[in-house]
Image: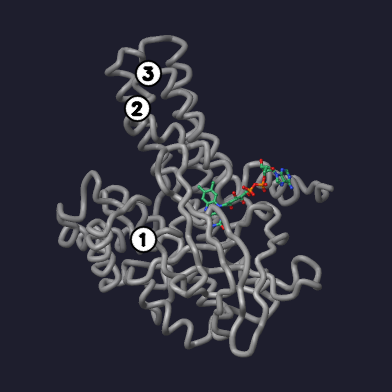
């Protein structure tokens, strides 16, 4: 059964598709032109051009309120938008983290000055943002973070280390979580700062992953003087700001099945070409991974349907993240069985090792299962 979208969503699809037909020329599309963590200046310049076209037409961040250059779009339009971007092969914006995670926190907790100074440049890809949350000893238990920011006149003085900062090597702004009251209980005494990464004392060291790419970074802060006006939300109440950011991060999961199912389709085609699709055991593996893709689609559609009926995107987003990340890893295993050594190089070779990160990023599988145990099964909190 196919999910039926309301007529307004289909009208939006037709309008956006026509816009893409007019604006998405070959210079912005195609192999090697999309967003990548390894972008050089030429590719960044090209993507920035594309980002500006999207922003001028109010397609760069359709979920943002209209007053900030968005369309105030609901979840169904966001899903349609993602489907059309995927179908057309259009590159995304330069600010995947900024637009979907950091901006909602700035809109909810920022001052008018912060919104006016930061949001338009983020929307047009003029600034690139990263998130400075995790530390070497604070990941799942984020509230254990130790990076300090102590007030000295009109400035915070920041010292400490962040890690796993996606895009940190390309970013010039960072949403940074710091401890401003070392004596308070650990969820209190945290604040959120919007930090200009060109300030003296900020040092970014790229981390090279198993794929050979620079995806994320360590960021060191040594006596960095950050103006007091960079505080986002009230002093010592950064935990609430962080939760706004993470709630939006989890809200993007409704589209995860698009990429997964496209990869499954590709593997099915390659299995036929390689003759593996006739093998009775491999056929079972292929059928199983196909079903995992379809299951994810149904979980996503359930979440969308709930949101259309006014239900918050709640446990479904944790379930979708779980199903998606585990299915991606199963897909890598099936690709290895079906394609043999050919799955060790090229796109499969890269994807099969990259997939290992997906059960960690954005909340680990184990932590997600604990959340589900409480929120869906009604079990008591783990000790
Ligand atoms: C691709 C990628 C991109 C990332 N991008 C960013 C970014 O841009 N900014 C940023 O700040 N961070 C980023 N991170 C970091 C990410 O948020 C953390 O890796 C994640 O929160 C887990 O923290 P950790 O690595 O410290 O592992 P830990 O929290 O130390 O966990 C280690 C193991 O213990 C398990 N565990 C921990 N606590 C519990 C528990 N209570 N119950 C059961 N099991 C538990 C975990 O599931 C895991 O298996 C990124 C990570 C990845 C992989």
Task: Locate residue 353, reporting x and y percent.
Answer: 46, 33
Residue at left offset 52%, top offset 36%? 356
Label drawn at residue 341:
3
Residue at left offset 32%, top offset 58%? 10
Judged by depth in the image, the label closer to the viewer, 1 or 3, is 3
Task: Locate residue 302, reporting x and y percent.
Answer: 53, 49
Task: Locate residue 278, reporting x and y percent.
Answer: 36, 11
Q: Are marks 3 and 2 in contact (CB under 8 Å)?
A: yes
User: What secondary structure is found at the residue carrying circle 1?
Assistant: helix
Q: Residues within 10 Å of mark 1 (few under 14, many from 20)?
A: some
Near-viewer residue (367 or 129)? 129
* Residue 131 drawn above or below residue 225: above
Q: CA distance from mark 2 to mark 1?
A: 40 Å
Instruction: Return the residue at label 2.
Output: 345
Q: Residues within 10 Å of mark 2 (few under 14, many from 20)?
A: few
Q: Quadrant of residue 27?
A: bottom left
* Residue 307 drawn above or below residue 261: below
Residue at left offset 28%, top offset 55%? 40
Label drawn at residue 9:
1
Residue 311 visible in this rendered orientation of the protein:
no
Q: Are marks 1 and 3 in contact (CB under 8 Å)?
A: no
Q: Quadrant of the N terminus?
A: top left
N-term-proximal mark, 1 vs 3: 1
Q: Is residue 375 left or right of residue 173?
A: right
Q: Is mark 2 within 8 Å of ligand 1?
A: no
Q: Is residue 5 left or right of residue 317?
A: left
């Amino acid at each position: 059964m196919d999910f039926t979208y309301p007529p307004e969503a289909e009208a939006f699809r037709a309008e956006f598709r026509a816009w893409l037909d007019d604006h998405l020329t070959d210079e912005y599309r195609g192999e090697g032109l999309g967003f990548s963590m390894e972008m050089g200046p030429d590719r960044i310049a090209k993507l920035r051009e594309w980002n500006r076209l999207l922003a001028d037409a109010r397609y760069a961040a359709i979920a943002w309120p209209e007053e900030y250059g968005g369309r105030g779009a609901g979840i169904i339009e966001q899903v349609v938008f993602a489907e059309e971007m995927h179908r057309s092969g259009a590159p995304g914006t330069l600010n995947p983290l900024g637009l979907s995670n950091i901006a909602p926190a700035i809109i909810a907790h920022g001052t008018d000055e912060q919104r006016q100074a930061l949001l338009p440049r983020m929307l047009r890809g003029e600034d690139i943002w990263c998130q400075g949350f995790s530390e070497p000893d604070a990941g799942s238990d984020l509230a254990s973070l130790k990076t300090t920011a102590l007030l000295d006149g009109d400035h915070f003085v920041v010292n400490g280390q962040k890690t796993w900062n996606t895009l940190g090597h390309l970013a010039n702004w960072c949403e940074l979580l710091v401890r401003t009251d070392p004596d308070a209980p650990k969820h209190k005494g945290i604040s959120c700062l919007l930090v200009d990464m060109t300030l003296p004392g900020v040092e970014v060291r790229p981390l090279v992953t198993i794929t050979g790419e620079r995806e994320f970074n360590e960021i060191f802060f040594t006596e960095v003087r950050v103006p007091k006006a960079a505080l986002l939300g009230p002093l010592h109440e950064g935990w609430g700001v962080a939760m706004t950011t993470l709630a939006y991060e989890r809200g993007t999961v409704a589209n995860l099945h698009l990429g997964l199912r496209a990869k499954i389709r590709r593997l099915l085609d390659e299995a036929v070409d390689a003759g593996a699709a006739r093998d009775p055991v491999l056929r079972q593996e292929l059928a199983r991974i196909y079903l995992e893709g379809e299951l994810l689609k149904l979980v996503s559609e359930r979440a969308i349907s709930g949101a259309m009926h006014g239900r918050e995107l709640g446990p479904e987003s944790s379930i979708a993240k779980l199903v998606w990340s585990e299915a991606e890893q199963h897909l890598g295993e099936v690709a290895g069985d079906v394609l043999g050594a050919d799955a060790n190089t090229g796109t499969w070779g890269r994807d099969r090792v990259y997939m290992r990160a997906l059960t960690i990023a954005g909340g680990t599988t184990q932590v997600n299962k604990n959340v589900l145990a409480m929120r869906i099964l009604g079990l008591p909190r783990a000790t």
